[in-house]
Image (cartoon, grey):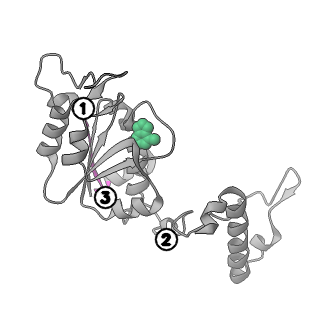
Amino acid sequence: MKIDILTLFPEICRAPLSESMMKRAQENGIVDLRIHNLRDWTKDKHHVVDDAPFGGGPGMVMKPEPIFAAVESLRNEKSTVVLMTPQGKRFTQSMAWEFAKTEHLIIICGHYEGIDHRVIEHLVDAEISIGDYVLTNGAIAAVVLVDATVRLLPGALGDDQSAVEDSFSAGSLEAPQYTRPAEFRGWKVPEILLSGNHAEIAAWRKKEAIKRTGENRPDLLDK
Ligand code: ADE
Protein backbone atom coordinates (compact mmCIF):
# COMPACT_ATOMS: atom_id res chain seq x y z
CA MET A 1 0.00 0.00 0.00
CA LYS A 2 1.14 3.55 -0.72
CA ILE A 3 0.24 6.55 1.46
CA ASP A 4 1.00 10.21 0.76
CA ILE A 5 0.32 12.73 3.53
CA LEU A 6 0.03 16.40 2.56
CA THR A 7 0.53 18.72 5.52
CA LEU A 8 1.90 22.10 6.53
CA PHE A 9 3.59 20.34 9.47
CA PRO A 10 5.49 17.28 8.21
CA GLU A 11 7.37 16.96 11.49
CA ILE A 12 4.14 16.38 13.42
CA CYS A 13 3.58 13.26 11.32
CA ARG A 14 7.18 12.14 11.01
CA ALA A 15 8.06 11.08 14.56
CA PRO A 16 4.97 9.03 15.47
CA LEU A 17 5.09 7.20 12.12
CA SER A 18 8.81 6.39 12.43
CA GLU A 19 8.66 4.21 15.53
CA SER A 20 7.80 0.66 16.44
CA MET A 21 5.27 -1.11 14.21
CA MET A 22 4.95 1.77 11.70
CA LYS A 23 8.73 1.80 11.31
CA ARG A 24 8.82 -1.95 10.72
CA ALA A 25 5.92 -1.85 8.26
CA GLN A 26 7.90 0.63 6.17
CA GLU A 27 11.19 -1.24 6.46
CA ASN A 28 9.44 -4.47 5.42
CA GLY A 29 7.84 -2.83 2.38
CA ILE A 30 4.30 -3.30 3.69
CA VAL A 31 3.62 0.41 3.32
CA ASP A 32 5.34 3.06 1.24
CA LEU A 33 4.67 6.19 3.33
CA ARG A 34 5.62 9.68 2.19
CA ILE A 35 5.07 12.87 4.15
CA HIS A 36 5.02 16.04 2.03
CA ASN A 37 5.01 19.73 2.84
CA LEU A 38 2.07 21.37 1.04
CA ARG A 39 4.14 24.55 0.68
CA ASP A 40 6.30 22.72 -1.87
CA TRP A 41 3.38 23.12 -4.30
CA THR A 42 3.04 26.90 -3.91
CA LYS A 43 4.30 29.05 -6.78
CA ASP A 44 4.72 32.44 -5.08
CA LYS A 45 7.85 33.75 -3.39
CA HIS A 46 6.37 33.59 0.12
CA HIS A 47 4.82 30.10 -0.23
CA VAL A 48 1.39 31.34 0.82
CA VAL A 49 -1.11 28.57 1.55
CA ASP A 50 -4.01 30.50 3.11
CA ASP A 51 -6.12 33.62 2.66
CA ALA A 52 -9.01 35.49 4.28
CA PRO A 53 -12.50 33.99 3.88
CA PHE A 54 -14.86 35.49 1.29
CA GLY A 55 -17.83 36.98 3.10
CA GLY A 56 -15.72 37.86 6.12
CA GLY A 57 -15.26 36.14 9.44
CA PRO A 58 -12.37 35.16 11.69
CA GLY A 59 -9.33 33.15 10.72
CA MET A 60 -7.85 32.06 7.45
CA VAL A 61 -8.89 29.53 4.83
CA MET A 62 -6.55 27.14 3.00
CA LYS A 63 -6.21 28.11 -0.66
CA PRO A 64 -7.19 25.55 -3.29
CA GLU A 65 -4.27 25.92 -5.74
CA PRO A 66 -1.44 24.17 -3.82
CA ILE A 67 -3.77 21.37 -2.71
CA PHE A 68 -5.03 20.68 -6.25
CA ALA A 69 -1.45 20.86 -7.60
CA ALA A 70 -0.18 18.43 -4.95
CA VAL A 71 -2.98 15.86 -5.35
CA GLU A 72 -2.86 16.03 -9.15
CA SER A 73 0.90 15.39 -9.13
CA LEU A 74 0.58 12.40 -6.77
CA ARG A 75 -2.63 10.63 -7.74
CA ASN A 76 -3.38 7.84 -10.19
CA GLU A 77 -6.60 5.96 -11.14
CA LYS A 78 -6.38 3.89 -7.94
CA SER A 79 -5.95 6.75 -5.47
CA THR A 80 -8.40 7.55 -2.67
CA VAL A 81 -8.20 11.17 -1.52
CA VAL A 82 -9.07 11.81 2.13
CA LEU A 83 -9.38 15.13 3.95
CA MET A 84 -8.85 15.21 7.72
CA THR A 85 -11.37 17.69 9.15
CA PRO A 86 -13.60 17.96 12.23
CA GLN A 87 -16.46 18.38 9.71
CA GLY A 88 -15.91 14.84 8.42
CA LYS A 89 -17.55 11.45 9.06
CA ARG A 90 -16.37 9.96 12.34
CA PHE A 91 -13.49 7.49 11.83
CA THR A 92 -14.20 3.92 12.96
CA GLN A 93 -12.45 0.55 12.97
CA SER A 94 -14.56 -0.58 10.01
CA MET A 95 -13.39 2.46 8.02
CA ALA A 96 -9.80 1.49 8.89
CA TRP A 97 -10.48 -1.99 7.40
CA GLU A 98 -11.86 -0.32 4.24
CA PHE A 99 -8.87 2.00 3.91
CA ALA A 100 -6.54 -0.98 4.43
CA LYS A 101 -7.98 -2.50 1.22
CA THR A 102 -7.10 0.55 -0.89
CA GLU A 103 -3.92 0.70 -2.95
CA HIS A 104 -3.12 4.37 -2.58
CA LEU A 105 -4.28 6.89 0.00
CA ILE A 106 -3.62 10.61 -0.34
CA ILE A 107 -4.37 12.32 2.96
CA ILE A 108 -4.84 16.10 3.08
CA CYS A 109 -4.43 17.65 6.52
CA GLY A 110 -6.71 20.62 7.08
CA HIS A 111 -5.56 23.67 9.00
CA TYR A 112 -6.68 27.18 9.92
CA GLU A 113 -10.43 27.85 10.02
CA GLY A 114 -11.07 25.60 7.08
CA ILE A 115 -10.31 24.75 3.53
CA ASP A 116 -11.69 26.20 0.28
CA HIS A 117 -14.82 24.14 -0.34
CA ARG A 118 -13.91 23.47 -3.98
CA VAL A 119 -11.30 21.02 -2.62
CA ILE A 120 -14.10 19.04 -0.97
CA GLU A 121 -16.45 19.31 -3.96
CA HIS A 122 -13.99 18.44 -6.71
CA LEU A 123 -10.95 16.66 -5.26
CA VAL A 124 -11.75 14.73 -2.11
CA ASP A 125 -13.37 11.26 -1.89
CA ALA A 126 -13.94 11.25 1.88
CA GLU A 127 -13.93 13.82 4.70
CA ILE A 128 -12.86 12.14 7.93
CA SER A 129 -12.89 13.31 11.55
CA ILE A 130 -11.18 11.29 14.28
CA GLY A 131 -13.66 12.42 16.93
CA ASP A 132 -15.94 15.13 18.22
CA TYR A 133 -13.28 17.62 19.28
CA VAL A 134 -11.18 20.15 17.39
CA LEU A 135 -7.43 19.74 17.03
CA THR A 136 -5.12 22.57 15.97
CA ASN A 137 -4.65 20.86 12.63
CA GLY A 138 -5.26 17.64 10.77
CA ALA A 139 -1.70 16.26 10.95
CA ILE A 140 -2.31 14.51 14.27
CA ALA A 141 -5.59 13.15 12.91
CA ALA A 142 -3.78 11.85 9.81
CA VAL A 143 -1.30 10.00 12.05
CA VAL A 144 -4.22 8.33 13.82
CA LEU A 145 -5.82 7.24 10.53
CA VAL A 146 -2.51 5.94 9.12
CA ASP A 147 -1.60 4.03 12.28
CA ALA A 148 -5.04 2.41 12.58
CA THR A 149 -4.99 1.46 8.88
CA VAL A 150 -1.40 0.26 8.44
CA ARG A 151 -1.51 -2.09 11.42
CA LEU A 152 -4.31 -3.98 9.61
CA LEU A 153 -2.20 -4.65 6.50
CA PRO A 154 -1.19 -8.30 6.11
CA GLY A 155 2.15 -8.86 7.82
CA ALA A 156 2.15 -5.58 9.78
CA LEU A 157 1.24 -7.21 13.08
CA GLY A 158 3.44 -10.08 14.19
CA ASP A 159 0.33 -12.16 14.69
CA ASP A 160 -2.39 -11.36 12.11
CA GLN A 161 -5.03 -12.87 14.36
CA SER A 162 -4.62 -10.07 16.88
CA ALA A 163 -6.13 -7.45 14.52
CA VAL A 164 -9.22 -9.60 14.08
CA GLU A 165 -9.58 -10.00 17.84
CA ASP A 166 -9.21 -6.26 18.51
CA SER A 167 -11.75 -4.21 20.35
CA PHE A 168 -14.32 -2.95 17.81
CA SER A 169 -13.36 -5.55 15.17
CA ALA A 170 -15.01 -8.12 17.43
CA GLY A 171 -18.04 -5.89 18.10
CA SER A 172 -17.23 -5.33 21.77
CA LEU A 173 -14.31 -4.15 23.87
CA GLU A 174 -11.58 -6.60 24.84
CA ALA A 175 -11.60 -8.72 27.98
CA PRO A 176 -9.15 -7.81 30.78
CA GLN A 177 -5.60 -9.12 30.35
CA TYR A 178 -3.11 -10.11 33.05
CA THR A 179 0.52 -11.15 33.10
CA ARG A 180 3.04 -12.26 35.75
CA PRO A 181 3.17 -12.03 38.72
CA ALA A 182 0.09 -14.11 39.50
CA GLU A 183 -0.22 -12.13 42.72
CA PHE A 184 0.71 -8.44 42.99
CA ARG A 185 0.19 -6.45 46.21
CA GLY A 186 -2.22 -9.15 47.29
CA TRP A 187 -4.35 -8.81 44.13
CA LYS A 188 -4.67 -12.18 42.44
CA VAL A 189 -5.11 -12.90 38.75
CA PRO A 190 -8.50 -14.61 38.16
CA GLU A 191 -7.99 -18.31 38.90
CA ILE A 192 -9.56 -19.41 35.60
CA LEU A 193 -6.73 -17.82 33.57
CA LEU A 194 -4.20 -20.08 35.34
CA SER A 195 -6.32 -23.21 34.82
CA GLY A 196 -5.16 -24.12 31.31
CA ASN A 197 -8.79 -24.88 30.40
CA HIS A 198 -9.04 -23.08 27.05
CA ALA A 199 -12.81 -23.48 26.62
CA GLU A 200 -13.52 -22.05 30.08
CA ILE A 201 -11.02 -19.24 29.54
CA ALA A 202 -12.70 -18.32 26.24
CA ALA A 203 -16.13 -18.30 27.93
CA TRP A 204 -14.78 -16.15 30.80
CA ARG A 205 -13.24 -13.70 28.34
CA LYS A 206 -16.48 -13.40 26.43
CA LYS A 207 -18.45 -12.70 29.60
CA GLU A 208 -15.90 -10.14 30.86
CA ALA A 209 -15.75 -8.43 27.44
CA ILE A 210 -19.51 -7.91 27.49
CA LYS A 211 -19.43 -6.68 31.10
CA ARG A 212 -16.70 -4.17 30.31
CA THR A 213 -18.45 -3.01 27.15
CA GLY A 214 -21.63 -2.44 29.18
CA GLU A 215 -19.68 -0.35 31.70
CA ASN A 216 -17.57 1.72 29.33
CA ARG A 217 -19.35 1.67 25.96
CA PRO A 218 -23.01 0.64 26.30
CA ASP A 219 -23.63 2.19 22.86
CA LEU A 220 -21.69 -0.71 21.31
CA LEU A 221 -24.03 -3.31 22.85
CA ASP A 222 -27.09 -1.47 21.50
CA LYS A 223 -25.93 -2.10 17.92
N1 ADE B 1 -8.61 18.64 12.37
C1 ADE B 1 -8.95 19.28 13.50
N2 ADE B 1 -9.70 18.52 14.30
C2 ADE B 1 -9.86 17.32 13.66
C3 ADE B 1 -10.56 16.12 13.96
N3 ADE B 1 -11.25 15.96 15.09
N4 ADE B 1 -10.50 15.12 13.05
C4 ADE B 1 -9.83 15.28 11.90
N5 ADE B 1 -9.16 16.38 11.56
C5 ADE B 1 -9.18 17.41 12.42
Three-letter amino acid code at the position of disc 3 = Ile
> Taking 6 as reference, is 172 left or right?
right
Farthest residue to the right: give it. 186
**Figure quadrant, ligand 1:** top left
Instruction: Please tell me whether mark 1 or mark 3 is closer to you in this view.
Output: 1
What residue is at 49 percent from the left and 46 percent from the top? Answer: 131
Dot 3 crowding, Cα within 10 Å, few <14, some 14–19, many 20+ = some
Residue under circle 3?
Answer: 30
Q: Secondary structure at mark 3?
A: loop
The vertical placement of 90 against 177, above or below, is above
Q: Amino acid at mark 2?
A: Gln
Instruction: Name the residue beneath numbered marker 2.
Output: 161
Q: Residue at x 29, y 30 (%)?
A: 8
Q: How many marks?
A: 3
State the CA–CA distance, disc 1 to disc 2.
36 Å
Label 2: element kind: helix
- Mark nearer the N terminus (1 vs 2): 1
**The image quarter in which residue 55 lies:** top left
- The residue furthest top is 46
Amino acid type at circle 1 is Asn
Q: Magenta segment, which residues?
A: 28-36
Name the residue carrying label 1: 37
Q: Are marks 1 and 2 in contact (CB under 8 Å)?
A: no
The reply to whether the magenta stretch includes residue 75 is no
